[in-house]
Image (cartoon, helix red, strand yellow):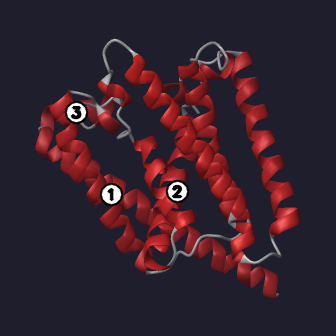
Amino acid sequence: MFWQEYGKNEILVMMLSLLVMVGITFLLWLFLHKKDRKTRNIPLVVITVLLLGLEIAKQVVSLCEPTYDYYAIPMHFCSLFLYFFPLAVFFKGKVQRFGLTMSLVCSAWLFVLLYWNPCPIIGFSPTHVFENFSNFHTFIYHHLAVLFSLVSLSLNMYNIDKWSFLHVIIGISVYAAIAIPLSYAVNVNFCNLLESNIPFMENFRQSAGQVVYLICMWLIGIGGGFVVCGGYIVIKKLVTLKIKK
């Protein structure tokens, strides 16, 4: 983990927040894991509504500023929850399955990145969460996204199968088709598309060129999604076999 930017207070808040989310997840599992899917979906609806409410508030605050900051446009990687979570909880059939797949993929990426190197994602908001709305939004938004994935996993809400790999290709490709031209249009580095804040990736971009770099970013996104879906399928099979024994 690269937590060198954080002091003891930030680390303490992050660990306590994780414990709170695990506690909430356990309680929800305790009361809901034997219920029908519609009932199990209720906490996910609540989380999604809270997430959307936070983003609406953020946009209102941004629009009230003298000049709208294009960085507030919800097209960052973590903005994808605003689109995939509603598909997963408010729709049915193929649309829901697509939303669930992409929700799992994006949540898995967020979980790994957030607890590997949190500062680039949420800054110092853990110890300044009530200092201003920006910090509050950043801290609560990302933790709600993590909570969504923990609750979904505990209540067995994901339907990952061979079609999920196609969902990943579609989801990542649609995002790239929108985010890449928009990044250039407004000159905002959405998802490190214009340049990378990871040294070795930035060196690669400068040596290989922008086109090759963007293709590699697209492939990394798809490859990462494949790993998440494949890992989920394997782990679920192993758990199922262990339970049967």
On residue 85, the disc is: 2
The mark nearer the N terminus, 3 or 1, is: 1
Question: Looking at numbered disc 3 in the image, what kind of residue is underneath it?
Answer: Leu
> Residue drawn 28% across and 48% down?
217
Residue 194, label in figure:
3
Q: Is residue 68 above or below residue 226?
A: above
Real-space CA distance between mark 1 and mark 2, rounded to the nearest whole angstrom: 15 Å
Quarter of the view holding residue 196:
top left
Q: Residue at x 67, y 15 (%)?
A: 7
- x and y, in percent, of residue 59 in the image: 43, 30
Alpha carbon of mark 3 to alpha carbon of mark 1: how far? 17 Å
Left or right for 33, reference 82? right
Tag 2, which secondary structure?
helix
Element at label 1: helix
> x, y percentage for residue 19?
80, 40
User: Which one is in front in this view, the residue at disc 1 or the one at disc 2?
Assistant: 2
Which amino acid does the dot numbered 2 rest on? Phe
Instruction: Answer whether labels 3 and 1 touch (C-beta < 8 Å).
Output: no
**Identity of the residue furthest to the bottom in this view:** 244
